[in-house]
Amino acid sequence: MRVMMTAAVLAGVGLGIKAAADRRAKQRDRRANGRWLAVTVCKPVDEVGAEGRLPEPLARLGDHVETRVTSAPADRGTELYARPRAPSPSGEDLRSLRVALREAKSIIETGEVVQADAHPSAHPGPAGKLLAMANRKAKGVGRL
């Protein structure tokens, strides 16, 4: 009986955390509508947007995004801005744009998309699956 009560409490806490995270993600996506997302790249402006060409991750999004390249303040590289052209983009559109900006920054600075090391745990249980899910979703959320 005690084990079932503990499992029920943990399941309820997990569902509450998931609901709160979903609510925060929706609020963040609503605030981001129409706003520019940006990354600062440690390269000069002429190396970032050379000849009007965008890095491949942003070019892949095509006409769905609007981009802008400017000098960063105090000669600290280049700021690369992007925003969706759609008047009310979906959360998935914003996540893919965030991922594209991060990948573009990585390609410009290092020549490749830098990947985080895999977690050493290959645990097949619930904790391992939860960790794998968090790692998959982590790229598309958060501040740039």
Image (tube, rainbow, N blue to C red):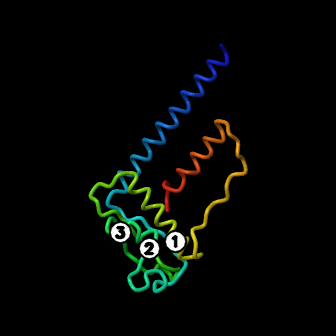
Placement of 4 over or under 139, stated as above or below: above
SS at mark 2 in the image: strand
The residue depicted at 59 percent of the width and 51 percent of the height is 135
Question: Which residue is farthest left?
Answer: 87
Placement of 5 over or under 93, stated as above or below: above
Q: Which mark is residue 120?
A: none
Label 1 CA crowd tier, 10 Å (few <14, some 14–19, many 20+) = many
Q: Which mark is residue 80?
A: 2
The CA distance from mark 1 to mark 3 is 17 Å
Placement of 65 over or under 22, stated as above or below: below
**In the rendered view, does 57 fall on the left or right side of 62?**
right
Pick whichever of labels 2 and 3 is earlier in the sequence. Answer: 3
The residue depicted at 54 percent of the width and 53 percent of the height is 138
SS at mark 1 in the image: helix
Q: Nearer the viewer, mark 1 or mark 3?
A: 3
Pick whichever of labels 1 and 2 is earlier in the sequence. Answer: 2
Q: Position of residue 109 (x, y in %)?
A: 57, 76
The CA distance from mark 2 to mark 3 is 16 Å
SS at mark 3 in the image: helix
Q: Position of residue 131 (x, y in %)?
A: 62, 45
Three-letter code, disc 2: Leu
Is the Cβ of the residue at disc 1 closer than 8 Å to that at disc 2? yes
Q: How many marks?
A: 3
Residue named by callout 1: 105
Three-letter code, disc 3: Gly
The picture quadrant where one finds residue 49 is: bottom left
Q: In which quadrant will I find the N terminus?
A: top right
Q: Position of residue 9 (x, y in %)?
A: 58, 24
Question: Which residue is farthest right?
Answer: 120
**In the rendered view, does 42 fall on the left or right side of 95?**
right
Pick whichever of labels 1 and 3 is earlier in the sequence. Answer: 3
Q: Nearer the viewer, mark 2 or mark 3?
A: 3
